[in-house]
Amino acid sequence: MSTAQALSPNRTTAGGEDFEYRPMSTGAIASLVFGLLSTVIFFAGRNDFQDSLLLTPFPLIGLVLGFRALATMRANPGQFTGGGFAKGGVALSLVCLIGGLSFAGYVYSTEVPAGYERTSFLELKPDEIDLRGNHNIPPEIAALDGKKVFIKGYIRPDSTNNGYRKNISKFLLVRDSNNCCFGDLSTVKYFDQMLVQMAGKDRIDYSPGLFRMGGTFRVNPQYARDRAEGPAFVLEADYAK
């Protein structure tokens, strides 16, 4: 057998027919993988628009890899397989990039009930300028005292009244469900928690998921420090979802 024959990509089947082996494009496979990963944008968009933005590299990478793989296959016809994977990765990535961000934007723009002003735990945290001015509570947050606000967060499970999980009237709403807010309460920053008291006969059931809360906002600047005797922020909630 000659060297040329030994290096030939042609193979002979058991029936004596020749076929040509073509390797799968790794770029095509990677594009499909990133396209599938991009679907998490829809799940993130249900909670927070910023979270969905943080995931946009997935579909962008899927698009770049898919288009590169298709271009390589067009430039080298017959050398690679995986065109379907590349097209699938591009399609998935494009749908998730446009559709996912559109869905997240729609949720963000419609989740605040009429008459409530949006705020967040991120805005409760004073920045360096606030601290240099001896403002442990940002002035724009202090100005919301007594007004109707809307905020999203998680119920700290050990903060519910009497340890109940049903028909809760009082609990701590915290920034996130990570260890920073679910660990030892003494380590939770005052701006990462808010005491929620359900108004009137309104009650809520515990869930580990994200809650959208609305109500009258109360600010207690005397407690705006870590390990204070009381909460710096209180929400007299009349809206929960």
Image (tube, rainbow, N blue to C red):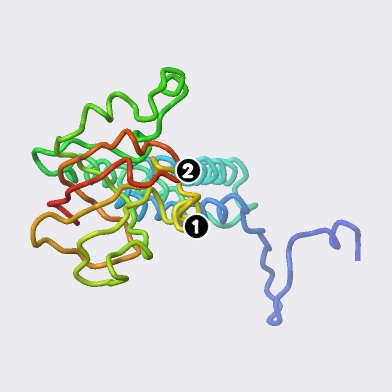
Q: Where is the N terminus found, in terms of image quarters?
A: bottom right
**Corner quadrant of residue 127:** top left
Q: How many marks?
A: 2
Q: Residue 175's x, y, as percent?
A: 38, 48
Q: CA distance from mark 2 to mark 1?
A: 43 Å
Residue in view at x 11 percent, y 61 percent: 202
Does 82 sit left or right of 148 as displayed?
Answer: right
Q: Is residue 153 above or below residue 204?
A: above
Q: Residue 158's x, y, as percent?
A: 38, 65
Q: Is residue 182 above or below residue 149?
A: below
Q: Is residue 79 above or below residue 13?
A: above
Q: Please tell me how crowded label 1 is: few (under 14), some (14-19), or many (20+) other residues with Cα within 10 Å.
A: few
What is the number of the mark on residue 184? 1
Mark 2 vs mark 1, foreground winner is 1
Secondary structure at numbered mark 1? loop
Does 99 sit left or right of 147 as displayed?
Answer: right
Q: Residue 189's x, y, as percent?
A: 45, 43
Circle 2 sits on which residue?
A: 63
Does 16 sit left or right of 210 as displayed?
Answer: right
Q: Please tell me how crowded label 2 is: few (under 14), some (14-19), or many (20+) other residues with Cα within 10 Å.
A: many
Residue in view at x 35 percent, y 35 percent: 124
Q: Where is the C terminus found, in terms of image quarters?
A: bottom left
Mark 1 residue type:
Asp
What is the number of the mark on residue 98? none
